[in-house]
Amino acid sequence: MTRAWILPMLFVLCGSVLATEMIFQGRFGAAAALLVAFVLLAGVNSPLVFPRSIGALEAQHRSAADGRPIVFWRSGCQYCLRLRIRLGRSAHRMYWVDIWRDPAGAEAVRAANDGNETVPTVVVAGRPHTNPDPAWVREQLSASA
């Protein structure tokens, strides 16, 4: 199992344990609601919410060809999730690199952030921007289209 799935699996496990305890107490409705809430939390914090990730080198080549921004991210990051949700459907027009799955992506983020793996780091026209405002990212995406 990769690091990206640890937090979602912990949510499901904790929700299952708590729901089981509630079932033994005879509180079936509350147990079902609690389990649904924990499964939703797991889904939101999983890699499934984000567009399909590609490698950093591939993203850099594609971005150089068409000018679209690159987003370096990792699952479990609340700022990455905020960016993804606020971008909506336009998020699919960017290149997403999961730094926990791609060592070259993690290295690119460390190079841009003084050795820290601070995400999201958005690269627009070769310049990295750490945790930018989602509205600004949308503007940059519109300009590259």
Image: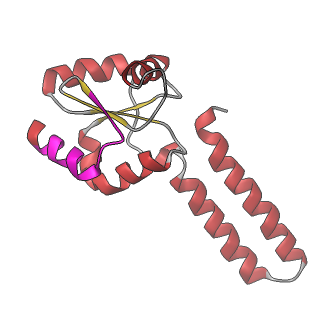
Does residue 35 appear left or right of residue 22 in this picture?
left
Point 36% across, 41% down: residue: 131
Does residue 55 appear left or right of residue 78 in this picture?
left
> Where is residue 14 shown, x and y percent of the image?
76, 58
> Where is residue 1 shown, x and y percent of the image?
67, 33
Q: Which residue is the extreme one toward the front?
A: 114
Q: Which residue is the extreme one toward the right?
A: 24
Visible in this render: residue 13?
yes
Up/down of 26 relative to 126, above or below: below
Does residue 4 appear left or right of residue 57 in this picture?
right
Visible in this render: residue 49?
no
> Where is residue 96 shown, x and y percent of the image?
36, 34
Main SS, magenta residues:
helix
Q: Quadrant of residue 105?
A: top left
Point 30% across, 24% down: residue: 59
Q: Quadrant of the C terminus?
A: top left
Please report the bounds of the magenta region as a residue range.
128-142
| 130 drawn magenta | yes
| 10 drawn magenta | no
Does residue 100 appear left or right of residue 2 in this picture?
left
Point 47% across, 22% down: residue: 106
Viewer-proximal residue, 69 or 130? Answer: 130
Up/down of 8 relative to 97, above or below: below
Up/down of 3 relative to 45, above or below: above
- Coloring basis for residues: secondary structure
> Where is residue 50 shown, x and y percent of the image?
42, 45
